[in-house]
Structure formats: C-alpha cells, structure tokens
Image (cartoon, rainbow, N blue to C red):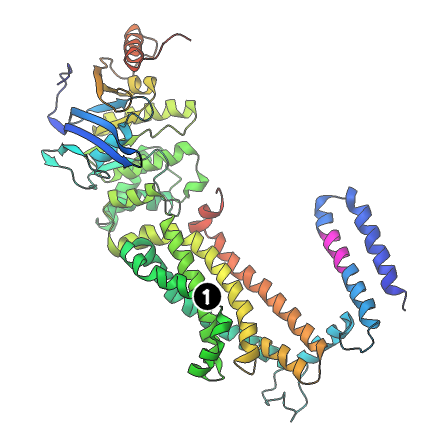
Amino acid sequence: MSGANGPGRAKVVLQGVGKSFETRKGPLEVLQAVDLEVREGELVCLLGPSGCGKSTLLNMVAGFEHPSVGRVLIDGEEVTRPNPRRVFVFQEYGIFPWASVWDNVSLGLRALPRAEQARTAQHVIDLVGLTGFEKAYPFELSGGMKQRVEVARALAVSPDVIYMDEPFGALDSLTRLTMRAELIRIWQAERKTILFVTHDVDESIQLADRVVVFTRRPGRIAEIITVGLPHPRDLGSPEYGRVKNRLFKLLGVRHEV
Amino acid sequence: MTWLPYALVAASTLAIVASRRWPERVQAVVLPLSLALIGLCAWHVAALRQERPVFPTPAGVWSGLQDLTQLAPAGSPDDPGAGVPRLWRYVVASLFRVGWGFTLAALVGIPLGLLAGWSLRTFLAINPLVQALRPISPIAWIPVAILWFGVADGAAVFLIFLSSFFPIVVGTMAAVRNISLVHVRSAQNFGLTGLELFRHVVFPAALPQIITTLRLALGVAWLVVVAAEMIAVNSGLGYLIIDARNMGMRYDLVLAGMLVIGLIGILLDGLIRRLERFDEVRWGYQQR
C-alpha cells in the first residue's frame, strides 16, 4: 500500500472507512474512504489539521464508534466493540482520579492471581519511571506523570495495539519532548503496534515509522510518508528537514514565518 | 447598669472602625463578634422596652437554656423519671429520627440513583415519578404520615425519609450522568461490566457529587424534623418549641430551642463535610 517495506504482517486493516454524523443541518461527512494497513509492531502517526476526523478514525478503530461505511479489521476480525487487548490512551487523562497509581495500573489485571498482579503492576510502574509513586493519587502528580500512569496502565495488560489520541497535547513543550523519547524507549522494549494521532508535525516525525497525512474535512488520506530515520533521531539532520518540508507542503502550510 | 448595652455598642462600633488596619485573620474574628454584640445589645434594649414582657432578653434566653439542662422537678409532666434533663432527651429524640430517616433515604436513594443514572430505561421509568413527587413539601405529607404511623417516631422518620430521599435520588442520578466520557470509555476498554463497573467506576466517579448531595439532604432533613415534631410527635426539639409556646408562652425556651437547633445543624454539616477529605474524593472538589 505504501512504499514502506518493514517486517511484520498486517495487524490493523481499514477498508473504505467513512463516517458521517447527523446534524440539524443534515449529515456531516467527517471521513471519506480511508484505506490503511498497519503492520504488527509498527508505530504509525495519523497527522492532520484539527477537525479532519483523525480522532474519530481512532475511536472507530478502538471500537468506541462505528464506521458509517467500510470496515475495520484487526487480525482479520471486524472490530465491533472495545477490547482489553487493545488499549486507548486518552488526551484528557483517562486514568481514574479516585484511585491510587497502583490501583489505576492494576485495573486491567483484575483476573490475574494476586502475586502476578503485583509483579506486573510493579514492572510497568518501573518501566515508565514512576517507582516510589505507587500510593500517590493523580491529583498529587504533574501532567506528565499522569500521562505516564496512563501509559503504564495500558502496558500492564500487555496489549497487541495501543491507541494514543494526542496523549501529550496537554503537556508543556519540554515535558512533551521527554515523553516522546520515553515512548520510543518503551516501544523499542515492548514492540507494540501503536497508532498515534497528532496535529504536531514534529511529533509525527520524531515518533513514526510512517506518517499518514489527512486532508481537511471530510478527511481523506493525502499521502503516507515513510520516515527512514533510525532512533534516536537527529532533529537537525537534512533528512529530518526534508520530511518536515514534505509534510508541511501536504498540509498546505507555509513553512517560513 | 442601663448604660452597659450602649457602652458595648460604642465599643463594638469602635472596634469595627479600627479593625480596618488589622491583619485579615484578626478581622475575621473581630468583625462578626462586634456585629453580633451590637445585635445582642439592640435586642436587649428592645426587649426591655416591650409593654408586655413576652419576648425574652438575651440573658432570659440564656437562663431558659439552663432551665432546659436542669432536671425537671419529680412528678411534673416534663419528668418521665428517666433522670435525664429535657433538653438532652429532646436532642437525642430529634437526632434519632433524622438518623434513621436520613440513613434509610441514603440506603435506598443512592443505589436507585446510581442505577437510574446509568441505565437509560430505569431513568425513563422512574424520572417522571420522582419529578412529580419531589415538589410536594414533606410538611404536606404530615397528615398521611400520622394516618399510617400514628403520633409516633415512625411518622417523623417517614417524613425525614421523604425529605432526604428525593434530593438524594436526583443528585445521585445527576452525578452519574455527569461522569466524564473518558472514564466511561476507559472502563469499556478494560472490559468492566456489571457490579465491577459500578464498584470501580460509576460509584467512585459519582461519589464527590453524591457527598455534596448528602450534605444538602441532611440540611433539609434537619429543617424538616423540627416541623414534623411540631405536629406529628410529642418529643424532640420541634415539640419543645411548640410546647413552650402553648404551655405558658415561654418564649425564652422557644428561643433557647432555636439556638440549640442552629448549633446542632452546624455540627451535622461539619460532620458530613469530613467525608470530603478522603483521598478517594478529594479530586472532585479541587478544580471545577
């Protein structure tokens, strides 16, 4: 489908997915005929202007909403509802403010025996660098730490796929950079398939194997760009600049200010 | 010492004027105290100038309060032989009724509200009924309560139950319907259903608002118990007030009773506010 030729079989497949909402002024089409294949272990960014339907697309892939036309397949099976094996990381903290870090992270581990629950919870808490904050409540944590809790909660259930909807959008720009580096570190350690929605061009180049660029509403795929840079990525390299120019052009934004 | 009240008013006024430059912490004490003192003095002077001395002075209320905390003379109608002063018996009687009525209302109202807030069908079924019954003042139910329960604790408990039940159901429903979509989706994502869903998400998410609702409901319950006791039973603080008026125009006891009602109201509110300090609910009172 795209020019990428990484390893792994097709994990998430979108076939002619479209979505329209009923409004008072008639139907509003937000997405049009989206075809996409995401391979196992791949990190794909969905990039587009606000309101292009990329979040709606992610919500459909996660099973929270349903396509008006077309199908979403994961491992060859059509998605009809949310599934604990594929976890969503929300932009506005989806972790539970009434529960401690430990209890939040253990949410998906309810079925496991106690000892294993504790081992897994501790493992992911250490992995996201929150060791020592197990008993803290979210209101005692910074925005970045809350987002780490959410990532840990997702990783705890050892999901096949992680969906991230602008997960770092509410953080300050320095924390955002750290969180991206952390995400790459964790992704390289765990090799999950990640679908990452963002409207930030730099974020998509820093993270993605491939960047799926959307047009304005009704959103269609304008182009899929493969980022051929190895991690850790040099933000000053000529290749980085080349990809960035290409993305800005596709988004119809002038690069110079 | 007819000059004393005037001297106190002058001193208080002076304190109010002078306190402008004092630290805020001091002002927070001085201002209300001075104002209260002026009020008491005005009350005292006005009470002394009545033609028929029915309305008591502040000092009269104070001695009335002391009367109430003394044992009644043996054999008098106020002495059941229990050896406990009237005031304490009445306070216990009122708290007993509020305690039962309010607890029952919470035990029925919170689960019903959680269910109706979560399940659209339950909401559609009970909401019109709740909304239709809610505006009927509990006071209007007094004749019905007496018919069903007689002039006894049951009638008062029933009235308190009614007064707390509707706010609790409506408040809990609203709390559940306010749960943020992100948390609902998190729950769906992690496969929570049935009781687990209620235990891990619906109940804790709604809890801060439920506590606020309980606080309001308890306030109303304390208002209603006084009214209920004036008619539906013959003990309690409400009965004390109406009895003191009917048996000899003892307005000093009426006002003493009102004072005690106010103080206990503050105490109850303070107790229920302690619930807001738990870690599980503090998030609900910070931002927003």
For residue B31: magenta?
A: yes
Depth order, front residue of A77/A136: A77
Depth order, front residue of B288/B144: B144
Q: Quadrant of residue B166?
A: bottom left
Depth order, front residue of A247/A106: A247
Q: Quadrant of residue A135?
A: top left
| In this view, A5 is above or below B12 | above
Q: Viewed as shown, does residue A88 lie left or right of B237?
A: left
Magenta stretch: give its range. Answer: B29-37
In this view, which residue lies farthest toward the top? A238
In this view, which residue lies farthest toward the bottom? B75
For residue B64: magenta?
A: no
Depth order, front residue of B142/B11: B142
Mark 1 falls within which chain?
Answer: B
Query: Does residue B232 appear in the picture of this structure?
Result: yes
- Residue B11 x %, y %: 85, 55
- Residue B130 x %, y %: 38, 63
| In this view, B185 is above or below A45 | below
Q: Can you identify the residue that label 1 sits on? A: B164
Q: Main secondary structure of the magenta part?
A: helix
Q: Residue at x 83, y 72 (%)?
A: B48
Query: Does residue B111 appear in the picture of this structure?
Result: no
- Residue B144 x %, y %: 45, 78
How many discs mark residues in the rendered view? 1
Q: Quadrant of residue B51?
A: bottom right
